[in-house]
Each structure stands twice: as C-alpha cells, then as structure tokens.
Image: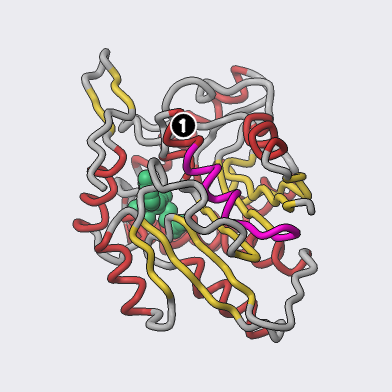
C-alpha cells in the first residue's frame, strides 16, 4: 500500500507533501489527540473548541435528516482519525432507536488501533483512498461519512479515486455526508493552490463535488455550515479585502490565544459564541457539510 506519490510540491518554498507519510507521522506523534487530525501546530484546547463547533453543527444536521432503518444501519467512515465522529453517530443512533454497524477506514494503522481500542465493536479497514479499488464496498453502506479527508488528497487522481470509492460504497437511496472546505464565495485564493503552508490540503469548489457526484447518480440535498473562519481559518469571502481582513484576525488568533491551552480554554465560551453568530449569519463559513443522496 506504500504509494510514495508526490502529491504536492511547492518549488518556491521547497515543501513537499506526501499524503501517506504526512498522516502516518501525525498519528504516530499525537496518538489519539485532536492535534493529529485538526490543527497540529495549535493547542489541543483550541482543537477541542473547533471540534465542539463542528459537532454542534453535525448533530443539528443529523436531526434534520429523516434517517430510518429497521435492521442495522450500516455506516462507513473514511479517514476516521481519532474516531471523534463515531461517538456522535453512536449517540445519535441510540437516541433514535437505530442500530448502527460501524466500519472505520484510515491510511494509518496507529489511528485504527486507537479507534478500535475505544470502540471494540467497530470493523477497521486499513486502506488508502488514493488507490483502493472503487468498487471494494460497492452498494454496501446506508451512510458513508467523510469528515475533512478529501481535501488532503491533493493529487487530482487520488481525490477522484477517494471520492468515487466513497460514492460507490453508498447503496441506492443511501447518503454520502462530506465535510469539506467547499468554496462557494466569489473570492478564494485556495481553489487552485494549497490551503496550508504545509501543502497538505486543497479547497475545491462546491460545483466540483456536484459535478462528479451527479455523474455517480447523486443529488445534493443540502449544504450546512460546519465551522466559521474563526475556528477553522478563512477559505473565502465575497471580496479580496474581506478575505484579507479575516486572514489578518485569524493569524493574530493563531499566534496568541489558539497556541496556548490555557488561553484557549479560558476563551472557549466567547469563541464559540462568536463562531455560532458567524455561522448563523450565513457568511463566513469555513468547512461545510455536504449531504448527497444516491438516487435509485
Ligand atoms: C483531517 S483528518 C480527519 C479525521 C477525522 N475524520 C476527523 O474529522 O476527526 C484526515 C484523516 O484522513 C486520513 N487519511 C488521509 N489520507 C488518507 C488516505 N489517502 N486514505 C485513507 N485515509 C486517509 C488521515 O490519516 C486522517 O485520519
């Protein structure tokens, strides 16, 4: 499975991102911590705030989707990381009398070991989305969940394979739930170059997801804000100036409050309050949940 493809080279800054190496290293270094899957350069307490914001959105989205199943609800999470979303899915299922059967996939064995130690009933699948056969799990799952994963497949072929694999794994009538920095505003510097200085992620236009998935028989049911730029960095704005202003504040926050566990935990309530206000305004969202249904 070791495909040492060069996913993104930044010649100017001499930085290379190799998808597999990068994630194996992060999971080995930050085992089980949100820093392994969120913002590794920022404090763990800040990462908890970011995830809390996204969790609030995720739970409200799940309650708006009419998910029903008399027998087991088969769910695949690709790029499971620390298993943060598994707990949310289990909680939702127990509240709605659903019986989940969970499969978790990741490129990192360290990540899978950690998740299985927390959730022993889970089925673990060690795979690389960049090259897994797209029909490995064809039509097998009621729901496929992919939270902040595809953006890290910066190589176009890897991204296509990962998205097609996720889509093909959904049964007819099932749901594909993506969480991505999908670009919808008129200005974004990230649509054709990496979002991060480490070259490890790429923002893509919403239309790109829609185009690929409509060819796979999906229709988009909804798009929901996940986290605002305040908790997950700005990715876009209506204007260049608007983007620069957000970027300026984001930089200050990352160099001060967000780097410190103490300051982050002290400011948690106010950050979440502001973040919720930005999300409610419908402008200033960073990550977005995209809900697609596979038509019969
Ligand atoms: C940003 S983290 C998100 C983890 C989790 N979904 C969450 O939201 O907490 C990206 C995850 O995708 C996994 N990943 C990255 N590239 C992958 C690939 N090519 N195949 C499978 N998993 C991959 C990483 O190991 C990591 O666990």
Residue 232 colored in magenta in the image = no
Residue 52, relative to residue 216: is it above or below? Answer: below
Location of mark 1 (residue):
202
Residue 276, relative to residue 88: is it above or below? Answer: above
Residue 266 or residue 82, whichever sits in front? 82
Q: Is residue 247 left or right of residue 273?
A: left
Residue 165 colored in magenta in the image = yes
Q: Quadrant of residue 91?
A: bottom right
- Taking the image as drawn, is residue 202 in sight? yes
Question: Residue 45 in the image: x percent, y percent?
Answer: 38, 61
- Taking the image as drawn, is residue 258 in sight? no
Question: Residue 207 in the image: x percent, y percent?
Answer: 68, 30
SS of the residue at dot 1? loop
At a point 63% along the width and 30% down the height, the residue shown is 208
- Mark 1 close to ligand 1, CB under 8 Å: no
Quadrant showing the C terminus: bottom right
Q: Is residue 234 left or right of residue 130?
A: right
Residue 70, relative to residue 218: is it above or below? Answer: below
At a point 52% along the width and 51% down the height, the residue shown is 135
Residue 224 or residue 106, whichever sits in front? 106
- For this orientation, the residue located farthest to the top is 12
Magenta region, residue range:
161-174
Question: Residue 84 in the image: x percent, y percent?
Answer: 45, 67
């Amino acid at each position: 499975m070791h495909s040492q493809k060069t996913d993104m080279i930044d010649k100017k800054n001499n930085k290379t991102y190799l998808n597999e190496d990068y994630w194996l290293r992060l999971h080995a270094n930050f085992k089980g911590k949100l820093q392994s899957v969120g913002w590794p350069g920022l404090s763990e307490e800040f990462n908890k705030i970011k995830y809390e914001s996204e969790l609030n959105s995720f739970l409200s989205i799940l309650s708006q989707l009419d998910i029903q199943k008399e027998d087991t609800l088969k769910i695949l999470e690709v790029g499971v990381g620390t298993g943060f979303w598994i707990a949310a899915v289990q909680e939702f299922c127990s509240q709605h009398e659903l019986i989940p059967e969970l499969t978790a996939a990741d490129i990192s064995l360290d990540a899978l070991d950690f998740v299985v130690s927390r959730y022993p009933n889970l089925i673990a699948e060690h795979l690389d989305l960049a090259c897994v056969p797209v029909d490995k799990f064809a039509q097998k799952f009621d729901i496929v969940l992919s939270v902040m994963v595809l953006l890290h497949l910066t190589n176009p072929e890897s991204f296509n394979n990962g998205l097609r694999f996720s889509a093909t794994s959904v049964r007819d009538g099932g749901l594909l739930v993506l969480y991505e920095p999908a670009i919808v505003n008129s200005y974004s510097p990230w649509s054709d170059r990496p979002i991060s200085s480490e070259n490890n992620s790429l923002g893509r236009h919403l239309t790109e997801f829609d185009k690929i998935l409509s060819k796979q028989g999906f229709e988009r049911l909804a798009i929901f804000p996940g986290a605002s730029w305040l908790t997950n960095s700005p990715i876009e704005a209506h204007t260049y100036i608007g983007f620069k202003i957000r970027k300026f504040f984001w930089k200050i926050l990352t160099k001060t409050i967000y780097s410190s566990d103490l300051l982050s935990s002290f400011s948690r309530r106010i950050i979440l309050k502001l973040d919720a206000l930005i999300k409610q305004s419908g402008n200033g969202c960073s990550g977005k949940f995209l809900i697609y249904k596979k038509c019969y």
